[in-house]
Amino acid sequence: MGKHHSQEYKQYVSKLIVEEGRKATEVAYELEISAKTISRWVAAYRMKLNVGKTDENYITPTELEKLKKQHEKELERLREENEILKKAMHIFTKNQA
């Protein structure tokens, strides 16, 4: 009898293939799952995408990296703004004394 995988796991594996462009055979080898099984998961995932009922609870490693880079840029921008405001406040309070 084969292994049973959760729906979330199947969706995550399918997302790796569909959205990151990884090859099903490579993923199957890495995860030690039949390529035929993964192909069925991917087909079901693509049908679900076509219906428009996507579940965005899981993100791929590539998506995670993109989000991290966006947040790092935003954080750096905010730090720069904060430093500018600190300097301006220092200048204004110095002139009042």
Image: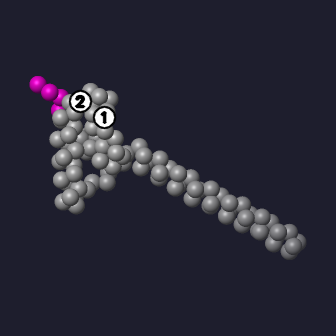
Q: Answer few, some or many: residues within 10 Å of disc 1's Cα (few below 14, many 20 plus, some between 14 and 19).
A: some
| Residue positioned 81% across, 72% down in the render | 92
| Residue positioned 57% across, 59% down in the render | 74
Q: Secondary structure at mark 1?
A: helix
> Residue pushed farthest left?
1
Indicate which disc, 2 or 1, sits on the residue closer to the N terminus: 1
With 28 as the anchor, is 65 left or right in this view?
right
With 71 as the anchor, is 9 left or right in this view?
left
Most foreground residue, 93 or 47: 47
**Three-letter code, disc 1:** Val
Q: Relative to 21, is 83 above or below?
A: below
Residues at marks 2 and 1 touching, judged by CB atoms closer than 8 Å: yes
> Residue pushed farthest top?
1
Q: Quadrant of residue 96?
A: bottom right
- Give me the C-alpha separation between circle 2 and circle 1: 8 Å
Q: Main secondary structure of the magenta part?
A: loop
Quadrant housing the N terminus? top left
Q: Quadrant of residue 48?
A: bottom left
| Residue positioned 23% across, 56% down in the render | 49
Residue 27 part of the magenta segment: no
Q: Which numbered marker is on residue 27? A: 1
Instruction: Give the labeled residue for mark 2.
Output: 33
| Residue positioned 27% across, 33% down in the render | 25
Q: Is residue 16 visible?
A: no
Most foreground residue, 88 or 55: 55
Rendering coords of residue 8 (x, y %): 25, 43
Rendering coords of residue 3 (x, y %): 18, 29
**Three-letter code, disc 2:** Ile
Magenta extent: 1-5
Q: Is residue 75 visible?
A: yes
